[in-house]
Amino acid sequence: MKINSSYKLHEIAGEKMLVIKGVAGADLTRVVMLNSSAEMLWNTFQGKDFEQSGVVNLLIQEYGIEILQAVADADAWISSMLKAGLIVL
C-alpha cells in the first residue's frame, strides 16, 4: 500500500492535519486531524510502499510497545487512512 500523494500534511494553529477538498463547486471539504503517532507514520511512509508489518515494527521501535498492541494500533491507523482515502492499495 502507499500513502495517497495528492494529500499534503499542513500545520494550522499548531495542529497537524490533512485537508481533503471536495469537487469544485461543492462544499465537501473534510479535515483529518493527526495525533503525533499518526503524523510520524504519515511522514515515515509518505512516498514509499509499505505493509502492515512495517507499521507494526516502527511502532514497536518508536514507542517500545508490545507486539499485540502494535498490531492493533497499526490496523487501526491503516483502516482509518483507507476509509478516508489517504492510503491506496
Image: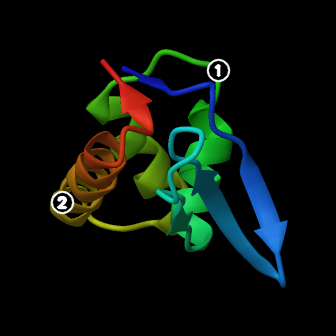
- The residue under the point 24% across, 58% down is 76
Q: Quadrant of the C terminus?
A: top left
Nearer the observer, disc 1 or disc 2?
A: 1
**Residue drawn at (62%, 25%) of the image:** 5
Q: Which residue is mark 2?
A: 72
Residue 46 placement (x, y as % from top left): 63, 30
Percent coordinates x, y for residue 17 in the rendering: 65, 65
Report whether 79 appears left or right of 20.
left
> What kind of element bears circle 1?
loop
For residue 65, side relative to residue 38 (left or right): left
Contact (Cβ within 8 Å) of mark 1 with mark 2: no
Q: Position of residue 48 (x, y in %)?
A: 58, 18
Rendered image quadrant of residue 59: bottom left
Q: For this rendering, which residue is in front, 6 or 68?
A: 6
Query: Which amino acid type is shown beneath numbered disc 1?
Result: Gly
Q: Residue at x 84, y 84 (%)?
A: 13
Q: How far apart are the two marked residues, 1 and 2, measured between alpha carbons? A: 24 Å
Residue labelled with disc 1: 47
Q: Residues within 10 Å of mark 1 (few under 14, many from 20)?
A: few
Residue type beneath disc 2: Ala
Say which label, 1 or 2, has the lower sequence index. Answer: 1
Would residue 8 be found to the left or right of residue 61 on screen?
A: right
> Eyeballing the image, is 71 above or below 31?
above
Residue plotted at (52% across, 39% down): 23
